[in-house]
Image: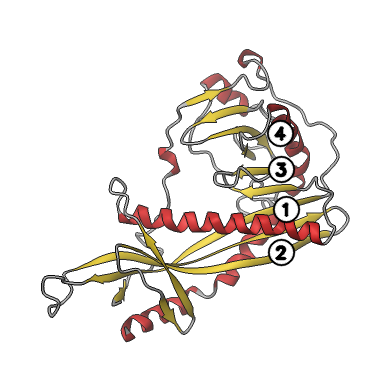
C-alpha cells in the first residue's frame, strides 16, 4: 500500500467531529416522574453513597491525515488513478475508581492506534513508533468521507470504553472493593453502553433545547444539587434524562448545569432512584474554576483521567514524524 501524509497540521481543517447538533428529536415525554404542569426543581435527598464510583472516559487524536493510492486497474503500469482520504489516529480509554475510605486510583488504561481508510486499500501502517492497525471504513454517501472516517473512529473509541467499563466492574469484584452497589459514570452519552447495570452518562454541553420554553426556563432556576424531573427522549435512540446543577459560583442561568442519561431497559422506579443518587454523588466531584477552565462540569476524576490518557497517547510530533518517514519508505 502506498500512502502519503498530508502536510497540513492535523488540527487544521480536519476537526472531523460528529455533528451532534443535527440530532432529530422525535418526541419528548415530560410526564415520567410528575405531571408536566407540576414540574418544579427537586431538592437533594440524604442517601447513602455507593461503595465505589467508577468514572470511565476516552480520548482520541488524529495524528495525521493520509492519502492512499487507488490503483489504475485499466493500466496497472501507469501511476495511481486516484487517491482516497484516510486518517491515522490514536485513541484510548480508562477508568478511575473512587472507593469509599480508599481514595481514588487509576485502572490500567487501554491505548490503540488505527489507520482508518475508505475502500479496499485498508492495511496496517507500521512505524518505528508503533503500528496503526487497519480499520476499513464504509463510506456514508450522504455524509462524505471525512464524517465517515470520524464516525468509524468514534465507534472504535466507544467499543474500547465499553471494554474498560466491563473490566473495571470485574476488577472491583476481584479485589472485593464493591458491594454490588457501585455506580458507573460515563463522560458523555450512554449510547452503546446503556445495557450495563447502574450506569449514568454525564453530558457537559447543551447544543439542543429538548424542553418546551417554560420548562427550559425552569432549568435556569435550579439551585446547586437540585435537578429537574426525569423525562424521556425519543431521538435516534431512547433514553431517560434529567438536568442537574452542580455547585458553582453564581453565573448565567445555565452555569454548572449538566444533563444526565440512563438507558430505558430498566423500570421507572429504578431510573428515579438513579436520578436521586446523582444529586448526592456527582456534586462531590465538581471541579473549581481555578483548577479547571471547564468547571464545574468537568468532574475531577474525569479531568485527571483525560490528562493521563493524553499522556499515554504519546507525543503527537514524534508520531507525525514517524508516519512521514513510513510514508517515504513505502
Which label number is shown at residue 54?
1
- The kind of secondary structure element at disc 1 is strand
Residue of label 2: 107
Instruction: Tell me if mark 1 has few (under 14), some (14-19) or many (20+) residues whose alpha carbon lies within 10 angstroms of its own.
Output: many
Residue of label 4: 275
Instruction: Tell me if mark 4 has few (under 14), some (14-19) or many (20+) residues whose alpha carbon lies within 10 angstroms of its own.
Output: many
**Residue 120 horizontal/vertical position (percent):** 30, 65
Is residue 176 visible in the rendered structure shown here? yes
Q: Are marks 1 and 2 in contact (CB under 8 Å)?
A: yes
Residue closer to the observer: 233 or 5: 233
Q: Quadrant of residue 32?
A: top right
Q: CA distance from mark 3 to mark 2?
A: 19 Å
Query: What's the residue at 46%, 36% (across, down)?
Result: 236
Q: Are marks 3 and 1 in contact (CB under 8 Å)?
A: no
Residue of label 3: 198
- Precedes in sequence: disc 3 or disc 2: 2
Amino acid at each position: 500500500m502506498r500512502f502519503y501524509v498530508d502536510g497540513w497540521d492535523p488540527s487544521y481543517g480536519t476537526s472531523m467531529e460528529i455533528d451532534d447538533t443535527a440530532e432529530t428529536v422525535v418526541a419528548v415525554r415530560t410526564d415520567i416522574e410528575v405531571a408536566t404542569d407540576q414540574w418544579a426543581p427537586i431538592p437533594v435527598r440524604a442517601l447513602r453513597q455507593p461503595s465505589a464510583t467508577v468514572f470511565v472516559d476516552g480520548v482520541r487524536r488524529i495524528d495525521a491525515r493520509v492519502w492512499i493510492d487507488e490503483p489504475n486497474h485499466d493500466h496497472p503500469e501507469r501511476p495511481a488513478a486516484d487517491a482516497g482520504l484516510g486518517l491515522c489516529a490514536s485513541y484510548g480509554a480508562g477508568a478511575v475508581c473512587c472507593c469509599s475510605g480508599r481514595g481514588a486510583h487509576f485502572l490500567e488504561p487501554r491505548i490503540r492506534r488505527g489507520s482508518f481508510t475508505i475502500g479496499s486499500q485498508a492495511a496496517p501502517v507500521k512505524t518505528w513508533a508503533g503500528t496503526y492497525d487497519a480499520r476499513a471504513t464504509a463510506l456514508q454517501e450522504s455524509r462524505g468521507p471525512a464524517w465517515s472516517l470520524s464516525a468509524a473512529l468514534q465507534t472504535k473509541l466507544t467499543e474500547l470504553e465499553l471494554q474498560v467499563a466491563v473490566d473495571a466492574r470485574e476488577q472491583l469484584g476481584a479485589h472485593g472493593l464493591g458491594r454490588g452497589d457501585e455506580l458507573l459514570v460515563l463522560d458523555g452519552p450512554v449510547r452503546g453502553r446503556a445495557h450495563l447495570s447502574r450506569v449514568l452518562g454525564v453530558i457537559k454541553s447543551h447544543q439542543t433545547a429538548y424542553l418546551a420554553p417554560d420548562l427550559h426556563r425552569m432549568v435556569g432556576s435550579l439551585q446547586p444539587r437540585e435537578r429537574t424531573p426525569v423525562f424521556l427522549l425519543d431521538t435516534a435512540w431512547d433514553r431517560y434524562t434529567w438536568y442537574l446543577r452542580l455547585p458553582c459560583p453564581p453565573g448565567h442561568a445555565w452555569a454548572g448545569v449538566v444533563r444526565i442519561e440512563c438507558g430505558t431497559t430498566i423500570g421507572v422506579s429504578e431510573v428515579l432512584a438513579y436520578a436521586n443518587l446523582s444529586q448526592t454523588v456527582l456534586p462531590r466531584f465538581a471541579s473549581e474554576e481555578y483548577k479547571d477552565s471547564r468547571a464545574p462540569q468537568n468532574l475531577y476524576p474525569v479531568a485527571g483521567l483525560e490528562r493521563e490518557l493524553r499522556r499515554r497517547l504519546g507525543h503527537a510530533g514524534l508520531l507525525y514524524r514517524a508516519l512521514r518517514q513510513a510514508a517515504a519508505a513505502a
